[in-house]
Image (spheres, rainbow, N blue to C red):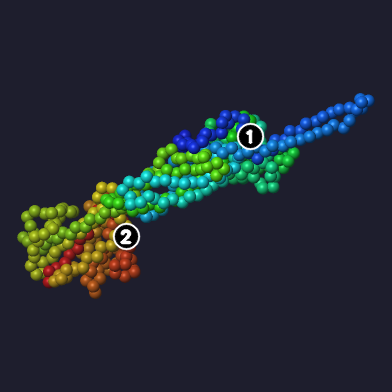
Protein backbone atom coordinates (compact mmCIF):
# COMPACT_ATOMS: atom_id res chain seq x y z
CA UNK A 1 0.00 0.00 0.00
CA UNK A 2 1.12 3.59 -0.57
CA UNK A 3 2.16 5.39 2.58
CA UNK A 4 1.75 9.10 3.22
CA UNK A 5 4.10 11.66 1.79
CA UNK A 6 4.29 15.32 0.96
CA UNK A 7 3.23 16.30 -2.53
CA UNK A 8 5.97 17.59 -4.78
CA UNK A 9 7.37 20.91 -3.69
CA UNK A 10 7.65 22.06 -7.30
CA UNK A 11 4.01 21.57 -8.29
CA UNK A 12 3.11 24.08 -10.97
CA UNK A 13 0.24 26.51 -10.71
CA UNK A 14 -0.19 28.87 -13.62
CA UNK A 15 -3.92 29.14 -13.26
CA UNK A 16 -6.66 30.72 -15.30
CA UNK A 17 -8.76 31.15 -12.17
CA UNK A 18 -8.06 31.25 -8.48
CA UNK A 19 -8.27 28.21 -6.27
CA UNK A 20 -11.38 27.87 -4.13
CA UNK A 21 -11.42 30.91 -1.82
CA UNK A 22 -10.69 30.40 1.86
CA UNK A 23 -10.71 26.62 1.73
CA UNK A 24 -11.31 26.37 5.48
CA UNK A 25 -15.08 25.81 5.38
CA UNK A 26 -15.70 24.40 1.92
CA UNK A 27 -18.64 22.03 1.50
CA UNK A 28 -18.47 19.23 -1.04
CA UNK A 29 -20.42 19.43 -4.28
CA UNK A 30 -23.65 17.40 -4.48
CA UNK A 31 -24.22 17.77 -0.73
CA UNK A 32 -27.91 18.20 0.08
CA UNK A 33 -28.57 20.82 2.75
CA UNK A 34 -32.09 20.51 4.19
CA UNK A 35 -33.71 23.08 6.46
CA UNK A 36 -36.81 21.98 8.38
CA UNK A 37 -39.00 24.37 10.33
CA UNK A 38 -41.37 23.14 13.08
CA UNK A 39 -44.40 25.05 14.35
CA UNK A 40 -46.00 24.10 17.69
CA UNK A 41 -49.34 25.62 18.66
CA UNK A 42 -52.56 25.16 20.69
CA UNK A 43 -56.23 25.80 20.11
CA UNK A 44 -58.32 28.44 21.87
CA UNK A 45 -58.75 26.10 24.85
CA UNK A 46 -54.97 25.70 25.06
CA UNK A 47 -55.05 22.15 23.78
CA UNK A 48 -51.81 21.17 22.10
CA UNK A 49 -52.12 20.56 18.39
CA UNK A 50 -50.00 18.28 16.26
CA UNK A 51 -46.76 20.06 15.31
CA UNK A 52 -46.44 21.25 11.73
CA UNK A 53 -43.26 20.95 9.72
CA UNK A 54 -42.06 22.26 6.39
CA UNK A 55 -38.72 21.58 4.70
CA UNK A 56 -36.68 22.95 1.84
CA UNK A 57 -33.47 21.50 0.41
CA UNK A 58 -30.61 22.97 -1.54
CA UNK A 59 -27.77 21.20 -3.33
CA UNK A 60 -24.20 22.45 -3.21
CA UNK A 61 -22.72 23.23 -6.62
CA UNK A 62 -19.38 22.15 -7.99
CA UNK A 63 -17.02 25.10 -7.87
CA UNK A 64 -14.35 24.54 -10.50
CA UNK A 65 -10.82 25.17 -9.26
CA UNK A 66 -7.48 25.18 -11.04
CA UNK A 67 -5.79 21.80 -10.52
CA UNK A 68 -2.20 21.29 -9.50
CA UNK A 69 -0.05 20.14 -12.42
CA UNK A 70 3.57 19.01 -12.47
CA UNK A 71 6.14 19.73 -15.18
CA UNK A 72 7.75 16.58 -16.63
CA UNK A 73 11.53 16.48 -16.90
CA UNK A 74 13.25 17.45 -20.14
CA UNK A 75 13.90 14.68 -22.66
CA UNK A 76 17.29 14.36 -24.35
CA UNK A 77 17.78 12.71 -26.72
CA UNK A 78 14.73 12.00 -28.79
CA UNK A 79 14.69 11.09 -32.47
CA UNK A 80 12.87 12.56 -35.44
CA UNK A 81 9.26 11.59 -36.18
CA UNK A 82 8.88 9.43 -33.09
CA UNK A 83 6.62 9.41 -30.03
CA UNK A 84 7.73 10.73 -26.65
CA UNK A 85 5.48 10.13 -23.64
CA UNK A 86 5.30 12.93 -21.06
CA UNK A 87 3.68 11.96 -17.76
CA UNK A 88 1.88 14.68 -15.80
CA UNK A 89 0.70 14.36 -12.20
CA UNK A 90 -2.55 16.26 -11.70
CA UNK A 91 -4.32 16.91 -8.39
CA UNK A 92 -7.85 18.25 -7.96
CA UNK A 93 -8.42 21.32 -5.78
CA UNK A 94 -12.16 21.53 -6.51
CA UNK A 95 -14.97 20.67 -4.08
CA UNK A 96 -16.29 17.84 -6.23
CA UNK A 97 -15.71 15.70 -9.31
CA UNK A 98 -14.60 17.45 -12.49
CA UNK A 99 -13.12 16.39 -15.82
CA UNK A 100 -9.87 18.00 -16.93
CA UNK A 101 -9.04 18.27 -20.63
CA UNK A 102 -5.39 18.37 -21.67
CA UNK A 103 -4.01 20.48 -24.50
CA UNK A 104 -0.43 21.28 -25.43
CA UNK A 105 1.50 23.91 -27.36
CA UNK A 106 4.98 23.86 -28.86
CA UNK A 107 7.66 26.48 -29.30
CA UNK A 108 10.16 24.87 -31.66
CA UNK A 109 13.75 25.60 -32.55
CA UNK A 110 15.36 24.25 -35.75
CA UNK A 111 12.45 21.88 -36.39
CA UNK A 112 10.46 21.83 -39.63
CA UNK A 113 7.07 21.93 -37.90
CA UNK A 114 5.51 21.91 -34.46
CA UNK A 115 5.19 18.66 -32.60
CA UNK A 116 1.76 17.04 -32.46
CA UNK A 117 0.08 15.92 -29.26
CA UNK A 118 -2.58 13.59 -27.93
CA UNK A 119 -5.35 15.35 -25.99
CA UNK A 120 -6.34 13.12 -23.08
CA UNK A 121 -8.96 13.88 -20.44
CA UNK A 122 -9.31 12.63 -16.88
CA UNK A 123 -12.11 12.65 -14.30
CA UNK A 124 -10.87 13.43 -10.81
CA UNK A 125 -12.99 13.03 -7.72
CA UNK A 126 -12.96 15.43 -4.78
CA UNK A 127 -14.78 16.03 -1.52
CA UNK A 128 -14.31 17.81 1.82
CA UNK A 129 -13.91 16.87 5.46
CA UNK A 130 -17.31 16.75 7.24
CA UNK A 131 -15.96 16.11 10.74
CA UNK A 132 -12.54 17.10 12.15
CA UNK A 133 -9.83 14.52 11.53
CA UNK A 134 -7.39 13.73 14.33
CA UNK A 135 -3.75 12.90 13.69
CA UNK A 136 -3.20 9.17 13.00
CA UNK A 137 -6.85 8.75 11.99
CA UNK A 138 -7.65 6.10 9.41
CA UNK A 139 -11.31 7.09 8.92
CA UNK A 140 -12.46 10.38 7.40
CA UNK A 141 -16.11 11.46 7.41
CA UNK A 142 -17.20 13.31 4.27
CA UNK A 143 -20.52 14.67 2.95
CA UNK A 144 -22.94 12.26 1.26
CA UNK A 145 -23.26 12.85 -2.49
CA UNK A 146 -26.83 11.53 -2.81
CA UNK A 147 -25.94 8.14 -4.33
CA UNK A 148 -25.28 5.21 -2.02
CA UNK A 149 -25.26 2.50 -4.69
CA UNK A 150 -22.18 3.36 -6.78
CA UNK A 151 -19.41 2.44 -4.33
CA UNK A 152 -17.89 5.90 -4.63
CA UNK A 153 -18.36 9.34 -3.16
CA UNK A 154 -18.05 12.40 -5.36
CA UNK A 155 -15.93 10.47 -7.84
CA UNK A 156 -13.55 9.01 -5.25
CA UNK A 157 -13.21 5.22 -5.39
CA UNK A 158 -11.42 2.46 -3.53
CA UNK A 159 -7.74 2.41 -4.52
CA UNK A 160 -7.64 6.08 -5.50
CA UNK A 161 -4.76 8.27 -4.39
CA UNK A 162 -6.02 11.36 -2.58
CA UNK A 163 -4.35 14.51 -1.33
CA UNK A 164 -5.74 16.00 1.88
CA UNK A 165 -5.44 19.80 1.87
CA UNK A 166 -3.78 19.79 -1.57
CA UNK A 167 -2.80 23.47 -1.52
CA UNK A 168 -1.58 23.32 2.07
CA UNK A 169 0.23 20.47 3.80
CA UNK A 170 -0.73 18.18 0.90
CA UNK A 171 -0.80 14.84 2.71
CA UNK A 172 -1.07 11.91 0.31
CA UNK A 173 -3.10 8.80 1.14
CA UNK A 174 -4.77 5.82 -0.49
CA UNK A 175 -8.46 4.94 -0.10
CA UNK A 176 -8.86 1.45 1.33
CA UNK A 177 -12.68 1.35 1.57
CA UNK A 178 -15.81 3.51 1.41
CA UNK A 179 -18.91 3.00 3.61
CA UNK A 180 -22.06 4.62 2.21
CA UNK A 181 -24.58 2.81 4.40
CA UNK A 182 -25.17 5.85 6.60
CA UNK A 183 -25.50 8.31 3.75
CA UNK A 184 -29.27 8.59 3.60
CA UNK A 185 -29.66 8.88 7.40
CA UNK A 186 -26.71 11.01 8.50
CA UNK A 187 -25.96 12.81 5.23
CA UNK A 188 -22.33 11.66 5.60
CA UNK A 189 -20.25 8.66 4.54
CA UNK A 190 -16.88 7.40 5.70
CA UNK A 191 -13.63 6.84 3.84
CA UNK A 192 -11.11 4.44 5.36
CA UNK A 193 -7.47 4.99 4.50
CA UNK A 194 -4.75 2.40 4.09
CA UNK A 195 -2.74 4.06 6.87
CA UNK A 196 -3.28 6.71 9.52
CA UNK A 197 -2.87 10.37 8.74
CA UNK A 198 0.22 12.25 9.78
CA UNK A 199 -1.60 15.49 10.50
CA UNK A 200 -4.95 16.61 11.86
CA UNK A 201 -7.43 18.35 9.57
CA UNK A 202 -10.35 20.65 10.37
CA UNK A 203 -13.91 20.58 9.09
CA UNK A 204 -14.12 21.75 5.48
CA UNK A 205 -10.61 20.70 4.41
CA UNK A 206 -10.48 19.80 0.73
CA UNK A 207 -9.68 16.24 -0.36
CA UNK A 208 -8.64 15.97 -4.03
CA UNK A 209 -7.84 12.95 -6.15
CA UNK A 210 -4.38 12.72 -7.66
CA UNK A 211 -3.52 10.75 -10.81
CA UNK A 212 -1.09 10.57 -13.71
CA UNK A 213 -1.91 11.52 -17.29
CA UNK A 214 0.29 10.73 -20.29
CA UNK A 215 0.53 13.14 -23.21
CA UNK A 216 2.18 11.58 -26.26
CA UNK A 217 4.29 14.04 -28.23
CA UNK A 218 5.22 13.22 -31.83
CA UNK A 219 8.41 14.97 -32.84
CA UNK A 220 8.99 16.49 -36.26
CA UNK A 221 12.11 16.55 -38.44
CA UNK A 222 15.21 18.65 -37.85
CA UNK A 223 15.56 21.58 -40.22
CA UNK A 224 19.36 21.53 -40.49
CA UNK A 225 22.34 20.15 -38.64
CA UNK A 226 22.20 17.55 -35.90
CA UNK A 227 19.60 18.76 -33.40
CA UNK A 228 16.51 20.83 -32.69
CA UNK A 229 14.05 21.25 -29.83
CA UNK A 230 10.35 21.14 -29.06
CA UNK A 231 9.49 23.22 -25.99
CA UNK A 232 6.19 21.88 -24.67
CA UNK A 233 3.66 23.62 -22.43
CA UNK A 234 0.62 21.58 -21.44
CA UNK A 235 -2.60 22.92 -19.93
CA UNK A 236 -5.30 21.10 -17.94
CA UNK A 237 -8.68 22.82 -18.28
CA UNK A 238 -11.82 22.25 -16.22
CA UNK A 239 -14.67 20.83 -18.30
CA UNK A 240 -17.12 22.46 -15.87
CA UNK A 241 -15.68 25.93 -16.48
CA UNK A 242 -13.30 26.49 -19.40
CA UNK A 243 -12.02 29.67 -17.77
CA UNK A 244 -10.43 27.55 -15.06
CA UNK A 245 -7.15 25.93 -16.05
CA UNK A 246 -3.55 25.28 -15.07
CA UNK A 247 -0.53 25.38 -17.39
CA UNK A 248 2.68 23.69 -16.37
CA UNK A 249 5.01 26.32 -14.91
CA UNK A 250 8.19 25.15 -16.63
CA UNK A 251 8.23 24.04 -20.26
CA UNK A 252 9.42 20.51 -20.98
CA UNK A 253 12.16 20.68 -23.61
CA UNK A 254 12.47 17.71 -25.94
CA UNK A 255 15.83 17.73 -27.71
CA UNK A 256 15.67 15.89 -31.02
CA UNK A 257 18.96 14.58 -32.34
CA UNK A 258 19.98 12.74 -35.46
CA UNK A 259 23.24 11.05 -36.37
CA UNK A 260 25.44 12.71 -38.96
CA UNK A 261 27.92 10.04 -39.93
CA UNK A 262 31.03 10.77 -41.92
CA UNK A 263 32.98 8.01 -43.63
CA UNK A 264 36.55 8.21 -44.85
CA UNK A 265 38.75 5.59 -46.48
CA UNK A 266 42.50 5.20 -46.16
CA UNK A 267 45.05 2.66 -47.36
CA UNK A 268 48.66 1.63 -46.79
CA UNK A 269 51.00 -0.77 -48.50
CA UNK A 270 51.44 -3.47 -45.87
CA UNK A 271 54.20 -5.34 -47.64
CA UNK A 272 57.24 -5.66 -45.36
CA UNK A 273 60.10 -3.27 -46.07
CA UNK A 274 58.06 -1.41 -48.69
CA UNK A 275 58.95 2.12 -49.69
CA UNK A 276 55.67 2.69 -51.50
CA UNK A 277 53.89 4.73 -48.79
CA UNK A 278 54.07 8.54 -48.69
CA UNK A 279 56.36 10.23 -46.18
CA UNK A 280 53.56 11.86 -44.18
CA UNK A 281 50.54 9.95 -42.89
CA UNK A 282 47.03 11.34 -43.08
CA UNK A 283 45.86 9.36 -40.04
CA UNK A 284 47.46 7.11 -37.46
CA UNK A 285 45.33 4.42 -35.83
CA UNK A 286 46.53 1.78 -33.40
CA UNK A 287 50.07 3.05 -33.99
CA UNK A 288 49.84 2.43 -37.75
CA UNK A 289 50.02 5.14 -40.44
CA UNK A 290 47.46 5.30 -43.23
CA UNK A 291 47.13 7.53 -46.27
CA UNK A 292 44.33 9.14 -48.25
CA UNK A 293 46.33 9.16 -51.50
CA UNK A 294 49.76 8.53 -52.95
CA UNK A 295 50.15 4.83 -52.06
CA UNK A 296 51.60 2.57 -54.77
CA UNK A 297 52.35 -1.14 -54.95
CA UNK A 298 53.69 -3.98 -57.04
CA UNK A 299 51.73 -7.04 -58.14
CA UNK A 300 51.57 -9.35 -55.17
CA UNK A 301 51.86 -6.56 -52.58
CA UNK A 302 49.41 -6.56 -49.66
CA UNK A 303 47.32 -3.41 -49.24
CA UNK A 304 45.50 -2.72 -45.98
CA UNK A 305 42.37 -0.57 -46.15
CA UNK A 306 41.12 1.48 -43.19
CA UNK A 307 37.49 2.65 -43.01
CA UNK A 308 36.61 5.34 -40.46
CA UNK A 309 32.94 5.83 -39.56
CA UNK A 310 32.59 8.92 -37.38
CA UNK A 311 29.54 10.04 -35.36
CA UNK A 312 31.27 12.81 -33.45
CA UNK A 313 29.58 15.83 -35.05
CA UNK A 314 28.42 18.35 -32.43
CA UNK A 315 24.96 17.52 -31.13
CA UNK A 316 24.68 14.25 -33.04
CA UNK A 317 22.26 11.53 -32.06
CA UNK A 318 22.79 7.80 -31.95
CA UNK A 319 23.28 5.98 -35.26
CA UNK A 320 21.84 2.48 -35.41
CA UNK A 321 21.91 -0.53 -37.75
CA UNK A 322 25.19 0.49 -39.37
CA UNK A 323 25.94 -1.84 -42.28
CA UNK A 324 29.14 -1.34 -44.28
CA UNK A 325 29.49 -2.91 -47.73
CA UNK A 326 32.83 -2.61 -49.49
CA UNK A 327 33.30 -4.27 -52.90
CA UNK A 328 36.83 -5.61 -53.30
CA UNK A 329 38.57 -3.48 -55.98
CA UNK A 330 39.21 -4.78 -59.48
CA UNK A 331 42.62 -6.40 -59.94
CA UNK A 332 42.90 -7.31 -56.26
CA UNK A 333 42.04 -10.36 -54.16
CA UNK A 334 40.56 -10.22 -50.66
CA UNK A 335 42.79 -11.87 -48.06
CA UNK A 336 40.64 -14.21 -45.99
CA UNK A 337 40.51 -13.66 -42.23
CA UNK A 338 42.00 -10.16 -42.27
CA UNK A 339 38.94 -8.15 -41.24
CA UNK A 340 39.42 -6.36 -37.92
CA UNK A 341 36.96 -4.06 -36.14
CA UNK A 342 37.33 -1.45 -33.43
CA UNK A 343 33.58 -1.16 -32.96
CA UNK A 344 33.31 2.08 -30.97
CA UNK A 345 36.77 3.63 -31.10
CA UNK A 346 38.18 2.15 -27.90
CA UNK A 347 41.58 1.62 -29.51
CA UNK A 348 41.25 -2.16 -29.50
CA UNK A 349 40.80 -4.04 -32.78
CA UNK A 350 39.09 -7.43 -32.68
CA UNK A 351 39.69 -9.95 -35.45
CA UNK A 352 36.50 -11.00 -37.25
CA UNK A 353 35.85 -14.46 -38.61
CA UNK A 354 34.31 -13.70 -42.00
CA UNK A 355 32.66 -17.10 -42.02
CA UNK A 356 31.23 -17.04 -38.48
CA UNK A 357 27.67 -15.73 -38.22
CA UNK A 358 28.24 -14.62 -34.62
CA UNK A 359 30.98 -12.19 -35.62
CA UNK A 360 30.40 -8.73 -37.03
CA UNK A 361 31.77 -9.28 -40.54
CA UNK A 362 31.39 -11.59 -43.53
CA UNK A 363 32.77 -11.95 -47.03
CA UNK A 364 30.55 -12.71 -49.99
CA UNK A 365 32.94 -14.52 -52.32
CA UNK A 366 30.41 -14.70 -55.13
CA UNK A 367 29.84 -10.97 -55.26
CA UNK A 368 33.35 -10.18 -53.96
CA UNK A 369 32.01 -7.86 -51.23
CA UNK A 370 33.17 -7.35 -47.65
CA UNK A 371 30.30 -6.69 -45.21
CA UNK A 372 30.92 -5.28 -41.73
CA UNK A 373 28.21 -4.63 -39.14
CA UNK A 374 29.96 -1.71 -37.51
CA UNK A 375 29.32 -0.08 -34.15
CA UNK A 376 28.44 -1.79 -30.88
CA UNK A 377 26.69 -5.17 -30.92
CA UNK A 378 26.75 -5.74 -34.69
CA UNK A 379 26.38 -9.30 -35.92
CA UNK A 380 26.46 -11.03 -39.30
CA UNK A 381 23.70 -13.45 -38.36
CA UNK A 382 22.38 -16.18 -40.59
CA UNK A 383 20.06 -14.18 -42.84
CA UNK A 384 22.47 -14.04 -45.76
CA UNK A 385 25.18 -11.73 -46.95
CA UNK A 386 24.45 -8.08 -46.20
CA UNK A 387 21.41 -8.90 -44.07
CA UNK A 388 23.02 -8.96 -40.64
CA UNK A 389 22.29 -6.66 -37.72
CA UNK A 390 24.17 -3.41 -37.86
CA UNK A 391 25.62 -2.04 -34.65
CA UNK A 392 25.15 1.28 -32.88
CA UNK A 393 27.33 4.36 -32.59
CA UNK A 394 26.41 6.80 -29.84
CA UNK A 395 27.18 10.48 -30.20
CA UNK A 396 30.93 11.03 -30.19
CA UNK A 397 31.84 7.44 -31.10
CA UNK A 398 33.93 6.24 -34.04
CA UNK A 399 34.13 2.81 -35.63
CA UNK A 400 37.31 1.63 -37.36
CA UNK A 401 37.45 -1.24 -39.88
CA UNK A 402 40.48 -2.64 -41.62
CA UNK A 403 41.10 -5.54 -44.00
CA UNK A 404 43.70 -6.66 -46.55
CA UNK A 405 43.72 -7.26 -50.28
CA UNK A 406 46.58 -8.35 -52.53
CA UNK A 407 47.33 -6.76 -55.89
CA UNK A 408 46.86 -9.38 -58.61
- x%, y% of residue 281? 11, 54
Foreground of the two, 11 or 145: 145
In the picture, measured across the screen, residue 190 lies left or right of residue 369, that is right
Q: Residues within 10 Å of mark 1 (few under 14, many from 20)?
A: many
Give the residue at x 7% y 57%.
Answer: 278
As drawn, 268 above or below 233: below
Q: Residues within 10 Å of mark 2 (few under 14, many from 20)?
A: some
Mark nearer the viewer, 1 or 2: 1
Give the residue at x 27% y 51%.
Answer: 224
Q: How many marks?
A: 2
Badge 1 vs badge 2, beta-carbon distance below 8 Å: no
Foreground of the two, 309 or 210: 210
Which quarter of the rendered picture does the C terminus lie within? bottom left
Give the residue at x 32% y 65%.
Answer: 388
The Cα–Cα distance between marks 1 and 2, rounded to whole angstroms, is 61 Å
In the picture, measured across the screen, residue 95 lies left or right of residue 302, that is right
Determine whether the residue tagged by mark 2 lies in a helix, strand or loop: strand
In the picture, measured across the screen, residue 149 lies left or right of residue 277, that is right
Foreground of the two, 385 or 50: 50
- x%, y% of residue 110? 31, 48
**Which of the 4 image quadrants contains residue 165?**
top right
In the picture, measured across the screen, residue 337 lies left or right of residue 18, that is left
- x%, y% of residue 277? 8, 59
State the residue position of label 2.
321
Give the residue at x 76% y 33%.
Answer: 36
Give the number of the disc on residue 27: 1
Amino acid sequence: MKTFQRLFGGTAIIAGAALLPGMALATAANTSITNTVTVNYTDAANNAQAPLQASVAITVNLVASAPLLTSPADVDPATEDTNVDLTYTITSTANGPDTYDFSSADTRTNMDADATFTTPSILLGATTVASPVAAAATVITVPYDGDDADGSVNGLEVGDTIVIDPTGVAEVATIDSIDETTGSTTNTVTITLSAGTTGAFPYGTLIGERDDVTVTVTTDSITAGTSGTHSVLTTATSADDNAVFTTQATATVITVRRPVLTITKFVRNDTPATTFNPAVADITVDGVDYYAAGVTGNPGDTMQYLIVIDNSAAGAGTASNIVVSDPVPQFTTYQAGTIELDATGTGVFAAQDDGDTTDAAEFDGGANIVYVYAGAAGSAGAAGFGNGTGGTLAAGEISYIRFDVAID
